[in-house]
Amino acid sequence: MKTLKAFEADFPNEDACKTLLAECRWPDGPVCPRCGNTGVWALKSKPHHWVCKSGKVTTDTEGKQVTCAKNGGYRFSVITKTIFQDTKIPLDIWFRVAYLMLTSKKGISALQIHRTVFGEDSGSDYRTSWFMCHRLRCAMRGGIEQLEGEVEVDETYIGGKEGNKHWDKRVGKREAASKKITVVGAISRKGNVIARTVDEMGFTTLSDFVAEAVSTKAKLVATDEHAGYRHLRGHGFFHKTVNHSAHQYVTGSVHTNTIESFWSLLKRGIMGSFHHVTREYLPLYVNEFAFRFNGRNDPDMFRKLLQTV
Ligand SMILES: [Zn+2]
């Protein structure tokens, strides 16, 4: 990614931001966000606004049947049905916040972002930045093709740390484990990672995850000996395991070192920048770390984010 200065020079004003957003959102020209119609008209009086007069009947977000052609047509703008909708925050501010998130390998706290973007004495509430970061994390979801090549699948547990409490207030080991949140992930060596939080590590959860994230064309699926992975071979995967409980970590190309380095990046980032992450929000942080990891060598990572807002 560019330096912040060079990045900001690309978007001197709101108009430039909107032009780029439209380009990324609709590379083949504007599309009605309500019915998917491509034959829309630009509103001459209002830049970055269009009108759709399609007669197609569609269901809106509230489940109501609607037709864009009614009442003179459905008007929309470049931010309609994006994470930027219904906020008073100008797009150049949004872009700067996104830039800081995408370039902070270990994550950056909302407080730090707030100081950088709004300034210490701006009088604005840091929760504005917190809210913006969360909306941006929502946009950092998925969009990664099934993994191929040599793939590692592994799980990790985050949160529920009891180390700082006085000994008699510590909960039992089993209870502490239940407070932790399980994250399962698959990584293609030298490629992308796909990770998400799961409620349990049962066989169905794991095999559904692997079937979704990993192509059966993958040369290898390496895991530890967790029972949940036992049936992968029966599902068309070339599955090999390392026996961590027997202190076996690498047998030839069979190891889970690559995904473990992603886990340590995620954990260090969460502990270092966010300190405490609840079950509700952890999926969003996982999105953020995976998105940034997958874009690590991509100079267009920011444009990629604008495609999914
Ligand atoms: Zn429409």
Image (tube, rainbow, N blue to C red):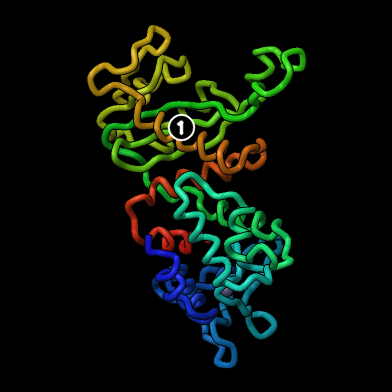
Q: Residue furthest top?
A: 246
Q: Amino acid at mark 1?
A: Ser
Measuring 41% from the left and 45% from the top, which residue is drawn there?
293
Measuring 41% from the left and 37% from the top, which residue is drawn there?
213
Which residue lies under the disc numbered 1?
Answer: 264
Residue 162 location, x and y as percent?
66, 22
27 up-or-down from 164: above or below: below
Q: Residue furthest bottom?
A: 45
131 or 153, which is in the foreground? 131
Residue 228 location, x and y as percent?
47, 19
Measuring 33% from the left and 37% from the top, which residue is drawn there?
188
Measuring 34% from the left and 21% from the top, which residue is drawn there?
233
Residue 250 location, x and y as percent?
29, 18
State whether residue 38 appears in this view: no
- Total numbered badges shown on the rendered structure: 1
Q: Residue furthest left?
A: 252
149 or 162, which is in the foreground? 162
Query: In what element is the residue under mark 1?
Result: helix
